[in-house]
Image (cartoon, helix red, strand yellow):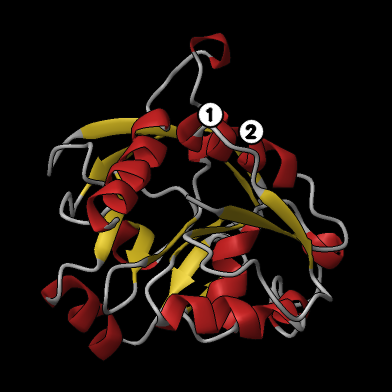
Amino acid sequence: MKSAVIVFPGSNCDRDLAVAFEAATGAKPAMIWHRDTELPDDIDLIGVPGGFSYGDYLRSGAMAARSPVMQAVARAADRGAYVLGICNGFQVLTESGLLPGALLRNAGGHFVCRDVALTVENAQSAFTSRYEAGEAISFPVAHHDGNYFADAATLDRLEGEGRVALRYAESVNGSARNIAGILNETGNVLGMMPHPERVIEAAHGATDGRRLFEGLVEGLLARA
């Protein structure tokens, strides 16, 4: 089982995500610099971390999405590798076209940094298989540009196809239909604004995020 975390200039959550991957898989992930053009052979799991790549100004994630390594991430996603984008990583995945929509400046223009209540909408994906559909969980958020936007037809399609993985229990940042995380068509790419990697140990104050990573490992083992 091979995992990797992409490292962009300015990222500050790459090591947090690497710790979560190692805790779940039992092996250290490869840390891949954004200018690299290849990923390890037969990579199973790729993390696109949060953390303000390129200073988190202008259109967040747009520059990172054009990093050479993102072409390798897209190829790996096409062959079925799991790709998890968190916060700034979610922005990168939309900007690179791996997920639809865009992340805009938060409604009200304020940075939001706190725990938020979430509802698990789809418990059928590998990312969410350790949760129950409709379950209430809590993850922290820390972003200025987490306002998910897509046109009405795209939102209808996402909801109709069960691709809304997580929804905010309240309006946090103005996201359309309170969407907090979405899946791609084949269910192997998840983008989400909340940070599950920050709640995997009791010492963090909560462990709701641990099951997301455990589900990924179970999904990979089932495919082996």
Marks 2/1 in contact by CB < 8 Å: the verdict is: yes
Q: Secondary structure at mark 1?
A: helix
Residue linked to disc 1? 23
Q: Amino acid at mark 2?
A: Val
Residue 108's place in the image compared with 58, above or below, is above
Residue 187 image-quadrant placement: bottom left
Q: Residues within 10 Å of mark 1 (few under 14, many from 20)?
A: some
Q: Does 61 sit left or right of 198 as displayed?
A: right
Spot the residue most to the top.
203
> Residue visible at 79% across and 46% down?
12
- Residue 100 visible in the snapshot: no
User: Residue at horizontal 69%, vertical 72%?
Assistant: 61
- In the image: residue 191, left or right of residue 214: right
Give the camera-side residue of 120 and 44.
44
Q: Is residue 54 above or below residue 110?
A: below
Q: Which quadrant holds the C terminus? A: bottom left
Q: Which residue is at 63% across, 81% downward? A: 72
Residue 42 image position (x, y, % from top left) = 51, 68
Residue 41 lies in what quarter of the image?
bottom right
Left or right, 10 with respect to 174, comes to: right
Residue 218, image x and y in percent?
A: 28, 42
Is residue 159 visible to the viewer in this orientation of the structure? yes
The residue that appears at 36% across and 40% down in the rendered structure is 212
Compute the Cα span from label 2 to label 1: 6 Å
Residue in front for this viewpoint, 77 or 169: 77
Q: Which mark is residue 114?
A: none
Element assignment for label 2: helix
Q: Amino acid at mark 1?
A: Ala
Residue labelled with disc 2? 19
Q: Position of residue 70 (x, y in %)?
A: 66, 79
